[in-house]
Image: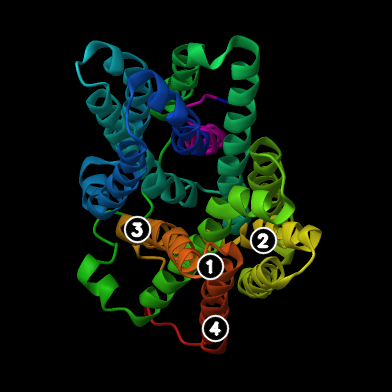
Amino acid sequence: MNIKTNYKHTVAACYIGYITQAIINNFIPLLFITFHNIYDISLEKIGLLVSVNFFTQLLVDLVSAKAADKIGYRTCVVTSQVVSSVGLILMAILPEVLSAPFIGILISVVLYAVGSGLIEVLVSPIVEACPFENKDGMMSLLHSFYCWGAMGVVLGSTLFFAVFGVKNWKILTFIWALVPLYNTFNFINCPIERLVEEGKSMGIRKLLKTPIFWLMIILMVCSGASEASMAQWASAFTESALGVSKTVGDLAGPCLFAILMGISRVLYGKFSEKLDLTKVMLVCGMMCAGCYLLASLSALPILGLAGCALCGFAVGIMWPGSISISSQKCPGGGTAMFAFLALAGDFGAMVSPAMVGSLSELAGGNLKTGLLAATFFPIVLVVGLIILIKHHKYNYFD
């Protein structure tokens, strides 16, 4: 079948889109110490790069809804791949040609952050608009590719540096930039449908006045927070709880977390037609709260590690599941709804790790205290889902 009429190519392009986002979010942090050493950039400035990346993505989440509806999905998603690739390429070039290497890195971060923000907003509605059955399962499988991408980037980069040395990081940057460059041509050629027919989507004002939409926003904030609180602190928690090296901590903590999160999304993608998504999320929310309690209260390090790893499995369905439920409850939400959902999830992912760090610092550096406080997020998610189940018979969108 011709690529221009085969929606399987559309879905495949979206899969690679999430791999691109995984490259953007996980590759450059591996080079932070390298930047510090070769360009003499302070750790404070390097920390600023993380904030710039995140706030740029939030800004894109906020403004992209109207742009995507006005310009079109294809133009915007192709742009996401182009600027992601250009940002990565310039990361290897600008620090060498500008008198201030940090400015070159900063420009590159802004560019690929724009790409990442567009990916987050557009890829889910593009898949949702494809004429396939079992959208819940497809959405879960779609989001699993971020997990596999993150694992591939970390393990692939670690192997490359072990064989060729960190000094050749620019070559690897060019290699990773080929992924979004290749995917640009996929999005140019594959069929892309509008999520809602022109003129039939809810306006932003009407969307913001809809009560259940705000419940969906709460679910997304809690989903992002439940995932990021453990994911961002998994390495440090594993090191401190088990007393192992950073390398072992990275493999035992973040990698186990990512593997189980990916497995969770693949499993739901396979069996979703036989399962009730809201009830599955309710069980996963309770499991997630239990994992946070196990990790933060257990006196045995191995149980703490188990809580950390199993948390990845529990949170796996939360983000894509919240998006799918929102699509069911608000079929006329259009691109604006997906943009606000992305904004809410990213906001939760920003606030929660900082909260864990601050509370841990107040407790004298006890990371378990911060993780215990983060139990708040899956508990709120569970409460929100119970409200949703109790009021499922009401259709707020008629």
- Residue 119 on the magenta span: no
- The numbered mark at residue 311 is 2
Q: Which residue is denoted by mark 3 in the rendering?
A: 343
Q: CA distance from mark 1 to mark 4?
A: 21 Å
Callout 2: SS: helix
Disc number lying in front (1 or 4) = 1
**In the image, is residue 349 above or below residue 17?**
below
Q: Which residues are magenta?
A: 2-17
Proximity of marks 1 and 4: CB atoms separated by less than 8 Å = no
Image-based side of 98 in relation to 50, left or right: left
Q: Amino acid at mark 3?
A: Leu
124 to the left or right of 73: right
What separation in Å lies between label 3 and label 2 (alpha carbons)? 23 Å
Q: Are marks 4 and 3 in contact (CB under 8 Å)?
A: no
Sequence order check: which comes first, mark 3 or mark 2? 2
Secondary structure category for the residue under label 3: helix
Cα distance between the residues tagged 2 and 4: 18 Å
- x 72%, y 70%: residue: 294
Q: Residue at x 42, y 51 (%)?
A: 125
Check disc 1 and report the residue beneath it: 370
**For mark 3, does the 10 Å Cα neighbourhood hold few (<14), some (14 to 19), or many (20 or more) residues?**
many
Q: Which residue is mark 4?
A: 383
> Mark 2 or 1 closer to N-term?
2
Q: Position of residue 75 (x, y in %)?
A: 29, 34
Q: Residue at x 66, y 69 (%)?
A: 296
State which quarter of the image contains the C terminus.
Answer: bottom left
